[in-house]
Amino acid sequence: MNKILDLTGEICPMNFVKAKLFLEDIAKGEIAVIILDEGDPLLNVTRSLKEEGYRVIRVEPNDTRAYKIFVEKGE
């Protein structure tokens, strides 16, 4: 089962900090789901996670103003 972190309502840069701390606890190759607000939170957190070596597998709408990102821990 995927681990899920809901960061809707969190502001930048705290949403990235919380996402990174959350992802530190998953094993390499494991997939986690992070729920983010649309707009800057989605764009900035996704970009920053890729820069940190995480693999964003897919992004899908969660509801009208939020998205789920599926993230795999890299090497």
Image (tube, rainbow, N blue to C red):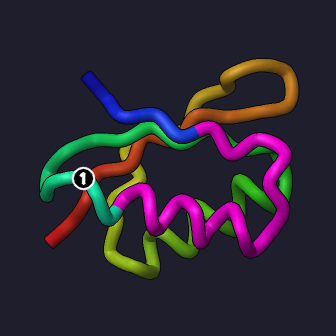
Identified by mark 1, the residue type is Ile
Badge 1 marks a residue whose secondary structure is loop
Taking depth in this image into account, of 14 and 41 the one nearest to the observer is 14
Instruction: Name above or below for residue 1 compared with residue 66.
Output: above
Give the position of the C terminus as an image quadrant. Answer: bottom left
* Residue at (34, 59) in percent of width and height: 55
- Bounds of the magenta span? 6-23
Instruction: Name above or below for residue 60 compared with residue 73.
Output: above
Q: Quadrant of residue 64?
A: top right
On the image, the x and y values in percent for residue 5 come to: 53, 40
68 magenta-colored? no
8 magenta-colored? yes
Q: Is residue 27 left or right of residue 64?
A: left
Q: How many marks?
A: 1
Q: Quadrant of residue 67?
A: top right
Taking depth in this image into account, of 4 and 52 the one nearest to the observer is 4
* Residue at (53, 59) in percent of width and height: 19
* Residue at (43, 56) in percent of width and height: 22
On the image, the x and y values in percent for residue 8 come to: 76, 41
Q: Is residue 43 left or right of residue 40?
A: left
Q: Residue furthest bottom?
A: 51
Instruction: Name above or below for residue 50 compared with residue 8.
Output: below
* Residue at (40, 79) in percent of width and height: 52
Q: Which residue is mark 1?
A: 26
Q: Quadrant of residue 2?
A: top left
Q: Residues within 10 Å of mark 1 (few under 14, many from 20)?
A: some
